[in-house]
Amino acid sequence: MMRDFLTMYERLEELLLNKLPEYITQWNKENSDLFKFELKQFTNQCMNPGIEKFPYFALTFIEKEQGKKHRIIDTINYKFNFEFFYEKDDIPAYEKTICYQQIICQMLHEDDFEYWLNFEVPKLTQRKFELLVHVEW
């Protein structure tokens, strides 16, 4: 199970640092008129930065829990927490967080990595959201 986790974490890190900028650029092209703001690119060089230039995010692994028994298939749920740090401006943090969360979920849906077949966002707040990934074994 640890190998599964490391594979998943490394893939997530690769996507967030290398693919996410393209998704943010695309979002800005398609949505900035509608939302009346552009999303800024993250300044992250790594997943859990120290003090960085804004905006940046931290990704932490919260917990792994046994899923409900579903007939023969066992599931393990891996929970990740995204926390966003923004510069002060006129755009409510919650609006930015929702947009970034939707972009990240779209990116995972479009990635053909097996672990992204079944995930959800059980919790979303002002500057955070949880990503719950269900892995069958």
Image (spheres, helix red, strand yellow):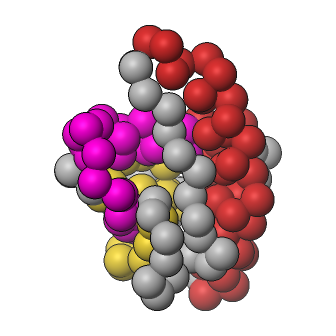
| Residue 86 % position (x, y) | 36, 57
- Residue 127 in which image quadrant: bottom left
Which corner quadrant holds the C terminus? bottom right
Please tell me which residue is depicted at 58% across the width and 65% down the height of the picture: 43
- Residue nearest the viewer, comparing 129 with 132: 129
Residue found at x 66% / y 50%: 20
7 in magenta: no
Which of 88/69 is in front?
88
Horizontally, is 75 left or right of 63 in the view? right
Residue 81 is at least partly visible in this image:
yes
Residue furthest to the top: 34
Residue 9 position within the rendered picture, expressed as x and y whole percent measured from the top left: 62, 74
The quadrant in which the N terminus is found is: bottom right
Front-lying residue, 82 or 93? 93
Count of marks, rendered view: 0
Which is more toward the observer, 129 or 77? 129
**4 above or below 12?**
below
Q: Against 2, is 72 above or below?
A: above
Whether residue 99 appears in magenta in the rendering, the answer is: yes
* Left or right of 69 in this view: 45: right
Q: Residue furthest front?
A: 89
Left or right for 118, reference 84: right
Residue segment shown in magenta: 76-104
Residue 88, how many percent across, how many down?
A: 28, 54
Judge left or right: residue 52 versus residue 15.
left
At x 28% / y 37%, what residue is drawn?
91
Whether residue 4 is visible: no
Q: Kindly identify the residue that appears in the image at 57 percent across and 76 percent down.
A: 47
Q: Position of residue 62 (x, y in %)?
A: 35, 77
